[in-house]
Image (spheres, rainbow, N blue to C red):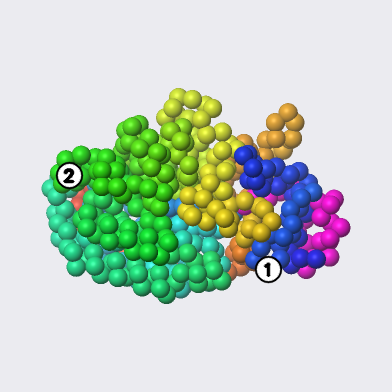
């Protein structure tokens, strides 16, 4: 007997080197853990009298998806930052909203982002942002999801970036305050929410802070046995700053000062050479790739497949932010990763569907430092499990010979709304496509209100910044 027993499903356990498929498979969950995995015919003998029995015939049963790099609060500016040059995106498209965004707006945006991810099967969120204590208390803990949380640390103040082609002005007091906030986040929130909250450290980027502050953050993370999660080589704007300040590139500079190691999660890394990607791989760096976001913001395919080819041990997928991405639906991220990397390499064998699903589950969990807890359906791991209904025209047919086509159908055809059940830490938090831990209509209404308050207040600043998108608005094209 167990608390939850899932039977007759098409299990993709991620155990071993591939998908670890078990047809007519079953999973038993007791408390927060998986206690049995195997064939239904065998497990029925011990678990048919479980408290809740879920019939999973015609459904895929997978580990919950891991979104390794996400900024959920940005969902309230969805649609405000696409189709602009990268050098404009942060300074002309996003910056105008900053001074009008209040803590309550961040919370409303984060709730919407988590709801979107959760309903498409994300159970672990690699959240980076500000205002993280109230966001954790009001969003991540009550929603029932698992999250690796980091408070962004930088030395950027209101007057730091008057010109993208001149060195940014650093404010050490800003850096000290943000590092102090990050330590407070760790002390107050690490292991909260029944152990679902894992706090790490996030130096914003090599262009946003001094070398001294970079190492202070690294040392604080190391003291606590935590990873550091940083934006690395994320575009032309950063490249200009690093060239002006250090006369080289981001990856080469970080390598020269000994910053690249297995304790660093490096996000993006698309403004890099093949040689630099190999450096990341050789140093054991963990790679968070966000292909949909970077495709829209930079028009570049991040080097996910290349990193793996060069021997990179840990790589995961992130949805990044919603204001210049495809949102927080991990099944869409899977498709983007596979298609874009095949195109980058002109090789259709790159990132086969079994590998792509592993990157979104077990390998993503390893990337974010949680591979011993989640990412696969195995006895002793936390019960983060999702059920995807396969009975849709676009997911039909499902056959097992000569090729089991469940994985290809999920990666290339699924939309995300087929996710029927989401279990996190042994608790059902999405049932029959409905979220049980958040009032969906209320979440959307509050996000709409927050978006209107922030966006409408920022109109004059946004138009004065005169980005390519603002020019399109002025011409009446949007």
Disc 1 versus disc 2: distance between alpha carbons? 52 Å
Q: What is the residue that sits farthest to the top in this orientation? A: 346
Q: Where residue 108 sits: x, y (%)?
A: 42, 67
Q: Is residue 198 visible?
A: yes
Q: Name the residue nearer the viewer: 399 or 383.
A: 383
Residue at 29% x, 43% y: name it.
255
Quadrant of residue 437 in the image?
bottom right
Taking the magenta stretch, the answer to whether it contains residue 405 is no
- For label 1, count other residues whose C-alpha is less than 10 Å away and answer few (under 14), some (14-19) or many (20+): some
Taking the magenta stretch, the answer to whether it contains residue 62 is yes
Q: Looking at the picture, does residue 215 appear above or below residue 334?
A: below
Image quarter of the N terminus: bottom right
Q: Is residue 476 visible?
A: no
Q: Where residue 164 sits: x, y (%)?
A: 17, 48
Q: Looking at the picture, does residue 251 appear above or below residue 26?
A: above
Mark 1 — residue? 31
Q: Name the residue nearer the viewer: 220 or 169.
A: 220
Q: Earlier in the sequence, mark 1 or mark 2?
A: 1
Q: Which numbered tag is attached to residue 96?
A: none
Tell me which segment is drawn in magenta.
40-63
Q: Are marks 1 and 2 in contact (CB under 8 Å)?
A: no
Tag 1 secondary structure: loop
Residue at 23% x, 64% y: name it.
175
Q: Nearer the viewer, mark 1 or mark 2?
A: 2
Q: Where residue 330 sits: x, y (%)?
A: 52, 49
Q: Name the residue nearer the viewer: 416 or 227.
A: 227
* In this picture, residue 250 sits left or right of residue 79: left
Mark 2 — residue? 246
* In this picture, residue 105 sits left or right of residue 373: left
């Amino acid at each position: 007997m167990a608390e939850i027993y899932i039977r007759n499903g098409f299990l993709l356990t991620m155990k071993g080197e591939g998908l670890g498929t078990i047809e007519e498979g079953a999973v038993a969950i007791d408390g927060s853990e998986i206690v049995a995995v195997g064939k239904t015919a065998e497990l029925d003998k011990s678990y048919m009298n479980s408290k809740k029995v879920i019939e999973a015939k015609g459904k895929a049963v997978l580990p919950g998806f891991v979104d390794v790099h996400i900024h959920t609060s940005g969902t309230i500016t969805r649609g405000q930052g696409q189709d602009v040059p990268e050098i404009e995106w942060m300074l002309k498209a996003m910056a105008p909203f900053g001074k009008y965004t209040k803590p309550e707006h961040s919370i409303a945006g984060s709730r919407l982002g988590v709801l979107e991810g959760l309903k498409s099967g994300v159970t672990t969120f690699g959240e980076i942002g500000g205002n993280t204590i109230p966001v954790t208390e009001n969003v991540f803990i009550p929603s029932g999801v698992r999250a690796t949380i980091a408070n962004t640390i930088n030395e950027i103040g209101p007057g730091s970036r008057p010109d993208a082609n001149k060195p940014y002005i650093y404010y050490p007091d800003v850096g000290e305050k943000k590092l102090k906030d990050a330590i407070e986040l760790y002390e107050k929130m690490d292991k909260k929410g029944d152990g679902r909250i894992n706090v790490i450290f996030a130096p914003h980027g090599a262009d946003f802070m001094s070398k001294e502050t970079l190492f202070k953050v690294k040392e604080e993370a190391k003291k606590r046995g935590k990873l550091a999660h940083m934006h690395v080589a994320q575009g032309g704007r950063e490249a200009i700053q690093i060239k002006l300040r250090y006369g080289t590139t981001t990856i080469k500079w970080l390598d020269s000062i000994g910053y690249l190691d297995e304790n660093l999660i490096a996000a993006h890394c698309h403004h890099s050479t093949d040689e630099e990607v190999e450096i990341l791989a050789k140093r054991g760096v963990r790679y968070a790739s966000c292909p949909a976001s970077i495709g829209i913001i930079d028009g570049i395919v991040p080097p996910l497949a290349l990193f793996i080819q060069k021997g990179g041990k840990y790589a995961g997928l992130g949805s990044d932010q919603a204001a210049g991405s495809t949102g927080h639906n991990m099944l869409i991220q899977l498709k983007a990763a596979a298609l874009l990397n095949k195109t980058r390499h002109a090789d259709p064998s790159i990132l086969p569907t079994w590998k792509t699903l592993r990157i979104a589950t077990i390998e993503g969990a390893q990337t974010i430092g949680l591979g011993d807890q989640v990412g696969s359906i195995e006895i002793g791991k936390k019960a983060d499990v999702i059920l995807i209904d396969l009975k849709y025209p676009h997911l039909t047919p499902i056959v097992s010979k000569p090729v089991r086509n469940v994985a290809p159908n999920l990666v290339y055809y699924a939309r995300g709304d087929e996710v029927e059940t989401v279990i996190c830490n042994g608790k059902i938090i999405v049932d029959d496509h409905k979220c049980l831990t958040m009032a969906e209509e209320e979440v959307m209404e509050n996000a709409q209100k927050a978006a209107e308050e922030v966006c409408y207040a920022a109109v004059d600043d946004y138009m004065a910044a005169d980005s390519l998108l603002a020019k399109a608005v002025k011409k009446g094209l949007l």
